[in-house]
Image (cartoon, helix red, strand yellow):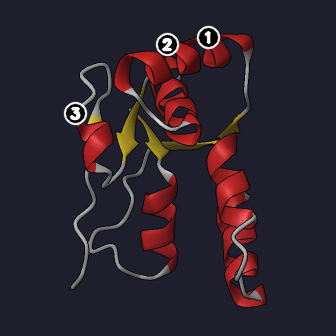
């Protein structure tokens, strides 16, 4: 089984808020998550190093014509923001379960979703 991490999942992992370890599976992210994470305005050097190390062990899905087309469809059909639509399209086309705690994305029937259990 394949897993695609939403940006919020990576942030929770970075902050040590995730109770359970990631499954032993192929793990992907969309290139948009990489952009969102590494362009955060107040990113410390420690956080940036963590993210670079973490991302070096994950498959990053680039934009492709198929992802672009499905992103447009997802944005129109579900009223998603562009980054969320790209992440959803990447999960669908890579046949991955989307790991996210985003309640809006959990409502999209085309997606297979798993939420993370977080520490208080």
The quarter of the picture where the C terminus appears is bottom left
**Mark 1–mark 3 CB contact (< 8 Å):** no
Which labelled disc corresponds to residue 69?
Answer: 1
How far apart marks 1 and 3 lie (CA) works out to 21 Å
Q: From this view, report whether residue 37 is shown above or below residue 29.
A: below
Q: From this view, report whether residue 46 is shown above or below residue 13.
A: below
Q: How many marks?
A: 3
The quarter of the picture where the N terminus appears is top left
Q: Position of residue 84 (x, y in %)?
A: 49, 39
**Mark 1–mark 2 CB contact (< 8 Å):** yes
Q: From this view, report whether residue 75 is shown above or below residue 83.
A: above
Give the residue displayed 27% in from the left and 74% down from the top. 19
Q: Which residue is mark 2?
A: 73
Apparent side of residue 110 relative to residue 94 in the rendered image (left or right) = left
Q: Position of residue 93 (x, y in %)?
A: 52, 18
How far apart marks 1 and 2 lie (CA) works out to 6 Å
Q: Which residue is mark 3?
A: 107
Q: Quadrant of residue 65?
A: top right
The secondary element bearing badge 1 is classed as helix
Report if residue 59 is visible in the image.
Answer: no
Which labelled disc corresponds to residue 98?
Answer: none
The secondary element bearing badge 3 is classed as loop
Q: Nearer the viewer, residue 42 or 110?
A: 42
């Amino acid at each position: 089984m394949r897993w695609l991490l939403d940006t919020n999942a990576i942030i929770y992992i970075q902050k040590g808020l995730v109770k359970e370890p990631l499954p032993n599976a192929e793990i992907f992210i969309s290139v948009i998550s990489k952009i969102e994470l590494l362009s955060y305005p107040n990113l410390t050097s420690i956080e940036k190093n963590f993210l670079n190390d973490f991302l070096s062990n994950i498959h990053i899905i680039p934009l492709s014509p198929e992802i672009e087309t499905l992103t447009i469809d997802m944005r129109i059909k579900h009223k998603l923001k562009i980054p969320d639509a790209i992440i959803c399209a990447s999960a669908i086309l890579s046949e991955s379960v989307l790991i996210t705690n985003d309640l809006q994305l959990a409502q999209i029937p085309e997606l297979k979703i798993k939420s993370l259990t977080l520490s208080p």
